[in-house]
Image (cartoon, helix red, strand yellow):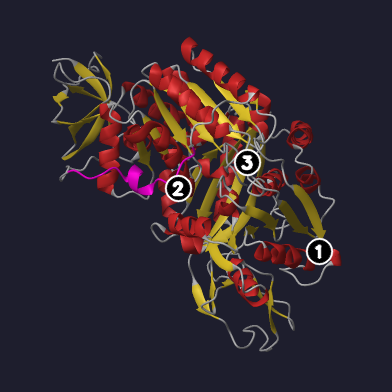
Amino acid sequence: MPLASVYPLVSTRALAKPFTYEVPETVGKGAVVSVRLGRSSTRGVVADVGVDAPMGIEPAPVGRLLDEIPATLVDLALWVADYYGSTPARALELVAPVRRTPRGERPSPAAREALGGEAEPEELTPDQEAAVERIVAALDEGVGEHVLLAGPTGSGKTEVYLQACAAALERGLGTIVLVPEIALAPQTVGRFRRRFGDRVAILHSSLGDAERRDERDRIASGEARIVVGARSAVFAPMRGVGLIVVDEEHDTAYKQESDPRYDARTVAAKRAALEGAVAVYGSATPRPESWARLARLPLGARIGAPLPSVKLVDLRREAGYPLSAPLLEALGRVADGRGRAILLLNRRGVAPAIHCRACGVSRRCSNCDVALTLHTDERLHCHHCGYVEDVPRRCPECGSVELARIGAGTQKLETELAKRIPELERFRLDADVSRRPGAVHDVLSRFRAAEAAVLVGTQMVAKGHHIPGVALAAVVDADTGLSLPDFRAEERTFQLVTQLAGRSGRDAPGRVLVQTFQPDATPLRHAQNHDVPGFLAGELERREALGYPPYRHLVAILVSGPAPDAPLAALRELRARLEGAGAEGNLLGPAPVLRLRGRYRAQLVAKTTQPRSVARHASTLLAAAARTMRRDGLTAVVDVDPQSL
């Protein structure tokens, strides 16, 4: 019998290597089989067939065949494990999840979740035609090209995706369409289903196990040649992929925050290279990395209506936060015209802090170094660990009754709107609402159907929703992100304001108001003028001088533990060993970061041109120290290309 290299799907780093087994002639690369490992049985993925047995080893036969995945996905998963410093087993589980036994037939969830789609336009704009021609030419070349489709909201990026998808289908090739949030999947599914019918499947984490299995079966069998989903859909078991679309490519939600900490945008590029496919990255506010590295397909202007005017409201000269006089006046016009408005406030709850006027102390979480947030249940919540406590009548520190509610969140904004403009029907979309299954679809559907309505929400209301009749979009507090100690703070503020501005005036004249205490801030000035190239040019110049992406990669190593000094000590030793091993790049830190969930944390950051090498060195050193770290209650995370520091 032929011999095969098989990776057992076990998380232990000591077993993070292939083992040799005998396989039947019919078993090939990508087979998921049952294997014996010591005294237990587990699943394994065949990575290669026709190998030689190691000296002194007599291979055992594999058990039964459990599933099969495309061979390309095996290569992709092993690359993910290597690049992101994970284990082969953890990465292979992304492409070969446990397959449940089918129990009857069900309709595809794509039909249930789809919102309405638009009809095909009679003709494309010249920019759209040029973009489609460029993508189709790359499809025919089959060499794995990557391009950036850049244009303002409403400039027709989705129609380019649809036309490119049709061209891929004509050539017998499949398409994967990634969206950053599950909330955006129904809108995208609806557009593709209107054009391509039941050939569309949907994949995301909110589906039940049976629905995910059924959709994967439709994809693997070739019944569904178009897949729409969030970041994990990049691992869809599709054969013959010709096109991968990454919509809203600037969005940080494409980064997975648990092991393996992959970035779906980077993985999409690797899969396209392996498949000889075209990867199309689309955004009205591209990342500086994409702007600098990718060939650009520009879409010049919004179709059908001009971009709305953007007015900065200087809160230093306005009273009435969170609803200034200019914002109230604009909302009154919306109510009179029976229109719709979207208000963005990137904080949940009623108030982001409870502050004692006497001693100056804010109520903070006992497990995390963050302020507790007041919600409408009149309780204080921690948004990191879930800790909840009642609002104290007196300050626990000094006994004063002078407790002030500082700032505002989405729940407070909703309450203020009810008081000031009751004629507007109110809808809210934030993490508190969206955790309920089907809530996002329900809220957006009801808002679309309402007249004289306002949608209040966190950043998810700025993400790609095409809702007709939005006459006003407003950022209630544009300064929330500017004060964050992160080199991407200005980029994200610019993206958030510009993206929200794009929700207004797509089918009628619109207005945008941005409330800020910093009207001269660089990202706000560029956003006011819809100046994407100008902002990116300045941002790239700054990053080159500082050695940040795209000019160098970042690798963050985070250690947490029950005592404050141990994480710092562990990272100091790790830094010394990395320097001794000649790891390429500049090492910054270690430095303490916020305590979360009762654990003290510290971070070491590398700026490097060789992220895979640094991650591999760090992972090897941490694995060697695993026993000592477990004894001290320490855990470590290696994060390549982190999206926040």
In percent of the image, x 60 and y 39: which residue is there? Answer: 250
- In the rendering, at what x and y percent does residue 531 appear? 77, 38
The residue carrying mark 3 is: 605
Q: Nearer the viewer, mark 1 or mark 3?
A: 1
Say which element carries label 3. Answer: strand
Q: CA distance from mark 1 to mark 3?
A: 37 Å
- In front: 591, or 459? 459
The image quarter containing residue 600 is bottom right
Circle 2: residue type: Ile
The residue carrying mark 2 is: 182
Pointer 1: residues within 10 angstroms few (<14), some, or many (20+)? some
The image quarter containing residue 536 is top right
Q: CA distance from mark 1 to mark 2?
A: 34 Å
Say which element carries label 1. Answer: helix
Give the mark, 3 or 2, whose residue is nearer the N terminus: 2
- In the rendering, at what x and y percent does residue 624 appear? 44, 38
- In front: 117, or 518? 117
In percent of the image, x 72 and y 42: which residue is there? Answer: 307
Which range of residues does the magenta coloring cover?
Answer: 105-118
Q: Is residue 171 magenta?
A: no
The residue carrying mark 1 is: 315
